[in-house]
């Protein structure tokens, strides 16, 4: 077992153990805080697939995060009011069905966005993904049917068969399982033929094309899968807060997802997990000390970008095996 | 009456376009010369607006406020460049995005600290109050016309600066080969600081001018920043001409879309529904235009040669 695997295992155990202890001590707030870490980490794992493995700096992943959230919110609202969705299809409060819908919707939106954005590279790609996300953001704001600027509150958490999701700990465990399953998927994808092609596309697209693999297709699939994971996380996030609003779609959210990855370590399996832990920790600790916590978060972030490249995992587990 | 309304909306679109040009020109210049993507450009816009509002309130003169906004934005721009941005030129876009994102957090929260969460208000100077008659009846705010004038003047001034002066020659040389002009004895560090401060001053000017039309508050720069990104993506990153054309396209399309789409939809559906759907579609219109342009020209209308 190398050092990074050990660190990963410790992080996974810490993330599971801390809320269990907190729940045992009757502190449900910390369980919810840990759930927030898990869900943000999951969203960033999605982005890490595109950004870390594929080198695609998407500044618009909040779009998929928010879409997933709105899927959960809209389905739950329709089900609560017993209104069918379009064409008589009944809505649902079943989490697995909501997740599948969120993933499918995120994927379907990501395909055209990716197909247009991936025609460009570099700074154009950053700005176009940002612009598409803003398009969806403004649409959500100006479309009054689902709350517009005010967002959409859900009266209760959606249901998971056999689990009382209203309690913090069971819901945490659902999210934790989802995160671990997705990390496993990430590891499998990374080691697969597709994953190698994706990393080759990041390092040298021309060479990849020379061996007969079209980089565009590889990148497009990666972008869509990445969006699907982030959409899944969005659905979980909406259920966590029992609220979905345009802020989930805003470009601050996109920026935060990138920040999570960089804080933890780009392209590493547990980078987003470590990043989300630090981010929520800062948010909670600084937020408790001063109302102006974003000011200090900015300073810390600036310091990390300028002086501590490689993130927390870079610090803890040394250089990655391959760059 | 409809003609007058149409002309009024066209002028509004032009005014928005000119504003966006002031922002986009700085962004595209900084990207073209230094290869830097600067998310904090919107914060410089905000700083310009706050400086103008504060100084105008203290001295009672909008014009002193306007000068203060230029000085404040250029000064903060120069400080940021020397302290932070300078370390980012050799980094990849990811680091640049993150560091300038961090700058936004710092500057926005800093402004809230200094000025509070309540918006400030800035009055239109007496000289520019009032309205001018439009052909076909109707009137148009003189101040908005003045903004269009300022934008045109800045466009001409930038063109002359870049094509006719020694500084402009160095900027063009920096765009095409920065090692070479450094080797020829040009102090590249100072040049970069000057270019960054120039871009910052233009953003500050835009903020101050718009401050008299809207309220001055934290976060006002962010929607404008994203529109300015759309502008330079459409126009071609690094091209001032592209920024001008892109800004006018975005300004006019956005304004006319908001004006015309609801009434066009009203022909086919009930009025209340048409207003809602029209507004929602209009808010997406410029992004659709951007996607269309990029589908045919992936590096914008006037791509600078790299």
Image (spheres, helix red, strand yellow):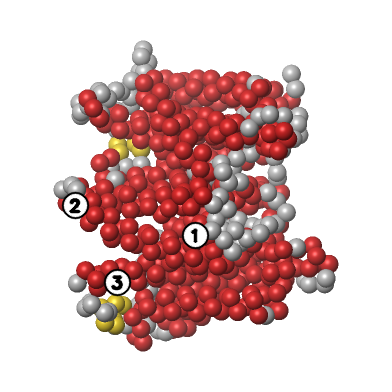
- Which residue is disc 3 drawn over? B8
Is residue B202 at all visible to an observer of this figure?
A: yes
Disc on the earlier residue, 2 or 1: 1
- Which residue is disc 2 drawn over? B267
Where residue A210 sits in the image (x, y, percent)? 72, 33
Where residue B201 sits in the image (x, y, percent)? 55, 72
Is residue A234 at all visible to an observer of this figure?
A: no
Left or right of B209 in this view: A56: right
- Separation of disc 2 and disc 1 at Cα? 31 Å
Mark whose residue sits in front, 2 or 1? 2
Res. B231 mark: 1
Dot 2: few (<14), some (14–19), or many (≥20) neighbours within 10 Å? Answer: few
Q: Residue at x 36, y 42 (%)?
A: A245
Question: Considering depth in this image, is B245 or A164 the residue closer to the camera?
Answer: B245
Where residue B175 sits in the image (x, y, percent)? 69, 64
> Label 3 lies in what chain?
B
Occupied quadrant, residue A232: top left
Where residue A246 sits in the image (x, y, percent)? 37, 44
Q: Residue at x 37, y 66 (%)?
A: B13
Q: Residue furthest left?
A: B270
Helix, strand or loop status at disc 2? loop
Q: Is residue B207 above or below residue A144?
A: below
> Label 1 lies in what chain?
B
Q: Residue furthest top?
A: A162
Marks 2,1: beta carbons within 8 A = no
> Label 2 lies in what chain?
B
Occupied quadrant, residue B185: bottom right
Q: How many marks?
A: 3
Marks 3,1: beta carbons within 8 A = no
Disc on the earlier residue, 2 or 3: 3
Q: Is residue B128 above or below residue A109?
A: below
């Amino acid at each position: 077992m190398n050092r990074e695997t050990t660190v990963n295992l410790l992080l996974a155990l810490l993330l599971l153990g801390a809320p269990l202890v907190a729940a045992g001590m009757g502190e449900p707030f910390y369980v919810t805080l840990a759930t927030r870490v898990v869900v943000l980490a999951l969203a960033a794992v999605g982005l890490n697939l595109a950004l870390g493995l594929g080198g695609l700096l998407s500044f618009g992943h909040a779009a998929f995060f928010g879409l997933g959230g709105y899927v959960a919110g809209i389905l739950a609202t329709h089900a609560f009011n017993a209104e069918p969705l379009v064409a008589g299809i009944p809505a649902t409060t079943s989490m697995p069905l909501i997740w599948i819908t969120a993933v499918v919707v995120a994927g379907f939106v990501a395909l055209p966005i990716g197909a247009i954005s991936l025609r460009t590279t570099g700074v154009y790609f950053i700005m176009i993904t940002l612009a598409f996300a803003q398009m969806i953001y403004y649409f959500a704001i100006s479309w009054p049917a689902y709350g517009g600027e005010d967002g959409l509150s859900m009266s209760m958490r959606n249901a998971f068969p056999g689990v009382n999701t209203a309690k913090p700990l069971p819901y945490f465990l659902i999210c934790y399982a989802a995160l671990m399953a997705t990390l496993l998927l990430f590891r499998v994808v990374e080691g697969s033929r597709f994953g190698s092609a994706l990393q080759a596309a990041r390092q040298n697209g021309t060479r990849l094309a020379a061996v007969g693999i079209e980089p565009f297709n590889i990148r497009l699939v990666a972008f869509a899968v990445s969006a699907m994971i982030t959409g899944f996380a969005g659905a979980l996030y909406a259920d966590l807060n029992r609220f979905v609003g345009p802020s989930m779609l805003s470009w601050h959210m996109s920026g935060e997802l990138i920040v999570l990855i960089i804080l933890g370590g780009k392209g590493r399996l547990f980078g987003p997990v470590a990043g989300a832990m630090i981010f929520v920790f800062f948010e909670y600790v600084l937020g408790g000390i001063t109302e102006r916590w974003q000011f200090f978060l900015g300073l810390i972030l600036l310091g990390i970008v300028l002086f501590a490249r490689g993130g927390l995992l870079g610090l803890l587990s040394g250089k990655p095996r391959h760059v | 009456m409809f003609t007058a309304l149409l002309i009024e909306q066209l002028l509004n679109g032009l005014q928005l376009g000119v504003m966006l040009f002031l922002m986009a020109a700085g962004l595209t210049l900084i990207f073209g010369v230094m290869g830097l993507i600067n998310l904090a450009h919107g914060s410089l816009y905000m700083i310009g607006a706050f400086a103008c509002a504060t100084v105008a309130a203290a001295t009672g003169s909008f014009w002193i406020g306007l000068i203060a906004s230029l000085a404040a934005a250029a000064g903060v721009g120069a400080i940021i460049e020397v302290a932070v941005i300078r370390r980012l030129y050799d980094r990849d876009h990811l680091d640049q995005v993150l560091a300038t994102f961090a700058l936004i957090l710092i500057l926005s929260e800093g402004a809230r600290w200094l000025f509070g969460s309540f918006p400030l208000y800035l009055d239109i100077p007496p000289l520019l109050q009032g309205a001018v008659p439009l052909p076909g009846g109707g009137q148009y705010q003189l101040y908005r016309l003045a903004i269009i004038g300022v934008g045109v003047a800045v466009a001409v001034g930038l063109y002359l600066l870049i094509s006719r002066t020694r500084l402009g020659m160095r900027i063009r040389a920096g765009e095409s080969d920065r090692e070479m002009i450094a080797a020829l004895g040009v102090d590249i560090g100072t040049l970069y600081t000057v270019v960054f401060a120039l871009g910052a001053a233009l953003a500050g000017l835009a903020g101050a001018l718009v401050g008299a039309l809207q309220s001055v508050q934290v976060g006002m720069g962010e929607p404008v920043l994203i529109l300015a990104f759309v502008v330079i993506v459409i126009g071609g990153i690094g091209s001032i001409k592209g920024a001008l054309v892109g800004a006018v396209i975005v300004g006019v399309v956005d304004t006319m879309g908001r004006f015309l789409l609801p009434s066009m939809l009203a022909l086919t559906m009930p009025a209340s529904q048409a207003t809602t759907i029209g507004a929602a579609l209009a808010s997406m219109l410029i992004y659709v235009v951007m996607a269309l342009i990029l589908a045919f020209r992936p590096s914008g209308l006037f791509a600078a040669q790299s």
